[in-house]
Image (cartoon, rainbow, N blue to C red):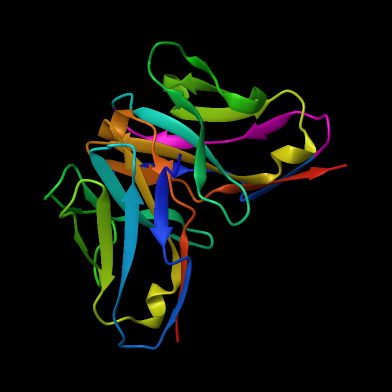
Amino acid sequence: NAGVTQTPKFRVLKTGQSMTLLCAQDMNHEYMYWYRQDPGMGLRLIHYSVGEGTTAKGEVPDGYNVSRLKKQNFLLGLESAAPSQTSVYFCASSTQGVRDIQYFGAGTRLSVL
Amino acid sequence: AQSVTQLGSHVSVSEGALVLLRCNYSSSVPPYLFWYVQYPNQGLQLLLKYTSAATLVKGINGFEAEFKKSETSFHLTKPSAHMSDAAEYFCAVSDRNQFYFGTGTSLTVIP
């Protein structure tokens, strides 16, 4: 079982560059989430989706955009990367939202220079 | 918005000793509560979940947590620490469609 797969695993960007992080899940989950993890701050929700074609803002959405064109994929975009976006990004999915277990990917380490 | 407080960013215990990781949440309504574990360079994995069926929740790897509404706490315990328990532990609370994570507690097990 692949579960939740994130690509790429590592990336280095220069300030102002753009990139897209891909999250794919093969569990037919309705809900998908993007988090960032920073030292001493735990995980903070960036954006989430409650189903195909839907997206919503989380706790720290500024500087990010997302799309959920297919149920199994959730894309996180950085249009103009900033050093403050250096972080580890995690994608997660679940079947029933807040009542349910989240399944996490292995993470993407992003450095913005 | 909900908030989660984990007291102690680093906890060290001897192998075989009791593990106690503290979590307090802010909510006037009993929320959904979770404990997750993160091993180095990996994503988070669920340890246990509070479902309101019982105040004492048993999870994987011998961990359990007790929901105390009067104290708004959901502390994680394990009677006897094992070297393999060394990891980062996160308490989380959910509200509407969002999850709120604590800042994490790094557990070190001393042989």
Residue A55 appears anywhere in the view? yes
The residue furthest top is B53
Query: In which quadrant is the C terminus of chain A drawn?
Result: bottom left
Measuring from the top left, give residue B30's x and y in whole percent: 33, 24
Q: Is residue B47 magenta?
A: no
Q: Position of residue B83 (x, y in %)?
A: 79, 39
Give A20 or A50, whichever is nearer the viewer: A20
Q: Is residue B2 visible?
A: no
From this view, report whether residue A60 is shown above or below residue B38. Answer: below
Q: Residue at x 48, y 65 (%)?
A: A9
Q: Which residues are magenta?
A: B14-28
Q: Is residue B25 magenta?
A: yes
B22 over B41 or under it: above or below: above
Q: Is residue B111 left or right of residue A81?
A: right
Residue at image position (12%, 49%) is A54
Q: Tell which of B86 and B41 is nearer to you.
A: B41
Dividing the picture into quadrants, the one containing residue B109 is top right
Count of number-bearing discs? 0
Closer to the camera, B1 or B37? B37
Q: Provide residue B10's location: percent of width, then percent of height.
A: 67, 50
Outermost residue on the right side: it is: B111
